[in-house]
Amino acid sequence: SVDEIVAILAHELGHWKMWHTACNLLVVQAHLLAFFFCLGGVLGYPGLYSSFGFGGERATVVGLLLFSNIISPVEHVIQFLQHLLSRRFEYQADQYAVDQGRGEDLTRGLIKISKENKSDANPDPLYSAYHHTHPALIERLGAIEKALKKRS
């Protein structure tokens, strides 16, 4: 319905008003800066090559492969933290829609979107926290309901 679309739009405007896109951009840029700084350090460190049996050779491809293996666990932690931030932003944008008087419509709209996308409304919390940038539908609906009760 039109009211549900307006509620979803209010949610998206919440992202805009709270500078979520700019914050995400800064986080990604900081991540890339740190990544390339570390990559430069690894590619320029001869001890790394020799410790893996590459002697005096410092082939860039070898350095990239070694770096990708070294950085992989760190990248998993960073991805988890980025998803936590993204999920927090989703709750804040939902709260903004509730504050605009669109909580009930947002609830109905999110349910329709979830059904249309055939998404799991209640996935395992650990799996969801690691793999999904948005909270599970059941978690979002609970937070919206709590905000609506607090508001009235």
Image (tube, helix red, strand yellow):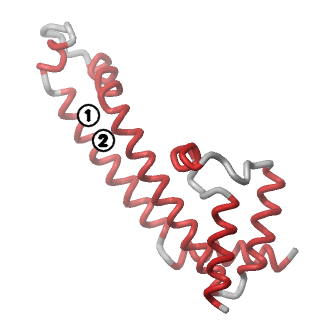
Give the percent coordinates (x, y) of residue 46: 12, 20
Locate the C terminus by quadrant. bottom right
Q: Residue furthest right?
A: 1
Give the alpha-carbon distance from disc 1 to disc 2, as whole Å: 6 Å
Left or right, 42 with respect to 133, comes to left
Q: Between residues 85 and 142, which one lies in front from this camera angle?
A: 142
Image mark for residue 39? 1
Q: Between residues 50 and 103, which one lies in front from this camera angle?
A: 103
Q: Is residue 66 above or below residue 121?
A: above
Locate the N terminus by quadrant. bottom right
| Callout 1 amino acid | Leu
Q: Residues within 10 Å of mark 1 (few under 14, many from 20)?
A: some
CB atoms of marks 1 and 2 within 8 Å: yes
Left or right, 92 with respect to 68, comes to right
Q: Is residue 114 above or below residue 7?
A: above
Q: Residues within 10 Å of mark 2 (few under 14, many from 20)?
A: some
Image mark for residue 35? 2
Quarter-of-image position of residue 71: top left
Q: Residue furthest bottom?
A: 152
Give the percent coordinates (x, y) of residue 64: 32, 24
Quarter-of-image position of residue 99: bottom right
Q: Residue at x 54, y 46 (%)?
A: 126
Q: Secondary structure at mark 2?
A: helix
Q: Residue at x 73, y 48 (%)?
A: 120
Give the percent coordinates (x, y) of residue 58: 19, 16
